[in-house]
Amino acid sequence: MGFVRLGCKPNENDLVAEYYFEPARGVTPKYACEQLAAESSIGTWTAIATLKPRTAARLAPKIFHLKRRGAGFVARIAYPDELFEAGSAPQLMSAIAGNVFGMRVVDSLRLNDFTLTKTLINAFKGPQLGISGVRKMLRVPRRPLCGTIIKPKVGLNEREHAGVAYDCWVNGLDLVKDDENLTSMRFNNFEKRLAATLEAMDRAQSETGERKLYVCNVSAETNEMLRRAQLVKDNGGNVTMIDILTCGWSALQTLRDANLRLVIHAHRAGHAALTRNPRHGISMLAIAKLSRLIGVDSLHVGAIYGKMEGNASEVLELVKEIQSPRVAKDEAQGALEQNWFGLAPVFAVASGGLHPGVLPQVVAAMGNDVFLQAGGGVSGHPDGVAAGARATRQAIDAVSAGVPLREYAFEHVELKRALEKWETTSPKSGK
Ligand code: CAP
Ligand code: MG
């Protein structure tokens, strides 16, 4: 096939993908990545009579980097951008993250990263609001945003849901979020929940003088998702949440293409099926890049100190990637990195096992442009949900004032009680 061209540089019309792979027994790394390059572009397992030499010369991928890493190898492949349908996330993923995962020549394969060309980037919409749009909506220029995921995930009726939301908003939280598996249930209907919760949000806004966000989960079959998103708009809501992996890339594109000027909050339920095994699957970096291209405004990236798996450096790489795209560091990024500067930055969402006691560490690691969400860390407060919301906001205020939590807790009883409950508790220990 002759796709290996080590040392050759990708050009500005090339999409570059980086893979980690472990060749199967008896397969050379070179042969394995030749096969990967072929299957993801113009080839198949054998030579074919239908591919004209001129077409092959025009569309052939180039493997320009192949090096050992740990138990496997890293290959970087440059694909001419003609191979990709501009603005189509499914086609992009079917090519660079499709059949290749099942090939016998590799025991494992991971898509680490990809970099698009300017033409391909410009074909995607990107975030409509981004960090600055969300901050303007809330009128909160600098501090981290704090919120909760209503717990139990499913089980409350519409009235109970709106009641918890109200208690959280009036006690200082910026946002209240539906959980990923709360959609429209027999005991909690979407329309009724939306109306009741937005009414509670209006009351909380006028009582506190603060703007609030209701992150309303519109995840559903695509047409129904769109209908629900429109209902959020028509009822005066401000945020739609979509489970990006279970709804799918097309659904996310459909939601973004609707141009509703609502914040698109991306929940990544199920991502670990792709991201958790470092030797196989798709990295969170790749998922984050695609989400940003399509146009989410806030994206779950992991909480570092929380209950979910994910090492800190991976999360930090994402935050850096999302908020200030890296300048080219090596030939994998090349000059194409600067094209990411055209896309609005996206809010990182830290969630999963957080409580007031860990918020200073999360902010120190992730910076101010972050949504800090605590579900159990608010609803599990020993004095109830209102106290949990106050304790969370107090922790954020302490961070903003540069005061250590224990000191702030002398005068803030809700924070004090939260620290007493969770100080010795780690989400990993499950206490
Ligand atoms: C958090 C959460 C989120 C996770 C997802 C949950 O609740 O609502 O879905 O944060 O993880 O159900 O676990 P708690 P990630 O605050 O009660 O843990 O952000 O890593 O995708
Ligand atoms: Mg959840």
Image (tube, rainbow, N blue to C red):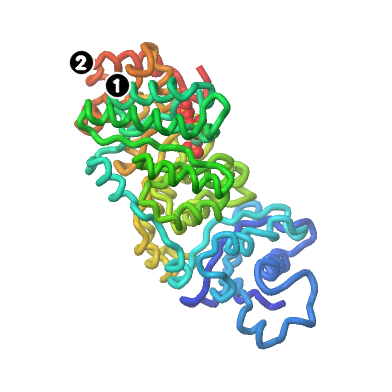
| Disc marking residue 25 | none
Whether residue 36 sits left or right of residue 249 in the image: it is right
Give the quarter of the figure containing the N terminus: bottom right
Q: Which residue is mark 2?
A: 411
Q: Residue at x 35, y 42 (%)?
A: 238
Circle 1 SS class: helix
Viewer-proximal residue among 298 and 12: 298
Q: What residue is pinned by disc 1?
A: 390
Q: Residue at x 49, y 21 (%)?
A: 156
| Camera-side residue of 327 and 285 | 285
Residue type marked 1: Arg
Quadrant in the picture for residue 166: top left
Picture coordinates of residue 234, whole percent (x, y): 38, 43
Q: Which kind of residue does numbered mark 2 sit on?
A: Glu
The x, y position of residue 72, in whole percent, is 65, 55
Q: Position of residue 138 (x, y in %)?
A: 26, 40
Q: Is residue 306 above or below residue 231?
A: above
